[in-house]
Image (cartoon, rainbow, N blue to C red):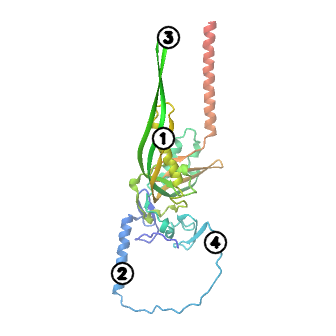
Amino acid sequence: MADTIKCPNCSANLVFDADAQKMRCDWCGAMFTTKELEDLRVDELEEVASSKEQSQVQTDTSVPEEESKTEEIPQEQPDAQEYVCNSCGAVVVTDANTSASFCAFCGSPALVGSKLTREFRPSKIIPFKYGKEKAVEKFFEWCKGGRMTPLDFVSDRNIEKLTGLYVPFWLFDVDGHLDIEATATKSSSVTTGSKTVTTVRTYRIKRRRKYHWSRIPLDGETKVDDLLMEAIEPFKYKDLRDYDYRYLSGFYADVYDLDNKALEQRLVKRITEYIDEEYKLTVKNYPSPRIVSNKNRIGGIKAEYALLPVWFLHYKYLNKDYYFAMNGQTGEVAGVPPVSVLKRLLLCTTVMTAVALIVKIIAMLFLKERFG
């Protein structure tokens, strides 16, 4: 059964307010930190335990055995799961990877805590810093920075879907070793009178260095665009906290469908590119160095599972879909906005008019100089 977090004052649903960094009750307006909720829960448990110790009433809890019944259970779709909302009794339907969702009928932020256990339970989380309204403002600000973005593109009516999602990430620690030997030649010439002397020097280049990278983020979700996620990096790990399910309230969250082993090949490719770039920087003063030995290696790979905040925006403009992502912690936005046909036409017209005017002025000056 899906569960929700209740307000201690009025028992309405609590959601995580990213702007205030507290749990908010929309019914009574109360705000609570996660620590305050934990302290209240501890007090309640202590009261229950105390009342049980004082009670000496014995009750007969035996019940007659019911006759065993067997019934045929219809086979469920493998990519869909159903959960019951404990606020209105409706069924919450999610895909196989969703661990927190909203009830489609009453809007309650129903949490599927049972799916974030064992191997799917993250060890760390970065809570959202941007709420929905600020996310929209930040996105519109980013769109307005594009000179060719259509004027009517940046409007509320074009937002079809804005989703705050905790994306499953693997944070990798990895060691890299640069170990390359290469050769390069430099030539210089000196001319004395009619004689030119050319000197060719051959250099043997050795480059050996050790590197260590901490918490390189790679998303473990196949439905999420990897390049889009890399474009909104980096995340600031100073806000990384031990996982607390309460931060999910009011947001979506997915569990990974790619484990850390499945991502190692992508990690190695990324680290290899880093090391290659480091090597090229050290030999940029040599013309066309030739590698004769490459013993670069990567090792010491460790991974930690975390949920990181991302706002996903789906825009529909002129019957075409556009997808964007915003770092829910830093506000970094990535995506490709549409290009205004009108602005492009105006630009082309302006450029052509300016070129025609310049040609006309040059022609008039030429004729004036030649014929007076």
Q: CA separation, marks 1 and 2?
A: 62 Å
Q: Quadrant of the C terminus?
A: top right
Which SS class for mark 1? helix
Q: Which mark is residue 194?
A: 3
Label 2, on which residue?
49
Q: CA separation, marks 4 and 3?
A: 91 Å
Compared with 138, 10 (above or below) is below
Which badge, 1 or 2, comes first in the chain's sequence?
2
State which mark lies toward you, 3 or 2: 3
Which SS class for mark 4? loop
The amino acid on which the numbered mark 3 sits, given as a three-letter code, is Ser
Which badge, 3 or 2, comes first in the chain's sequence?
2
Query: Residue at image x 63%, y 15%?
Result: 363
Label 4, on which residue?
76
Q: CA separation, marks 1 and 3?
A: 44 Å
Q: CA separation, marks 3 and 2?
A: 105 Å
The amino acid on which the numbered mark 2 sits, given as a three-letter code, is Ala
Which badge, 4 or 1, comes first in the chain's sequence?
4
Q: Nearer the viewer, residue 174 or 290?
A: 290
Label 1, on which residue?
277
Could you tell me residue 62's position as x and y percent?
Answer: 48, 92
Residue projecting furthest to the top: 372
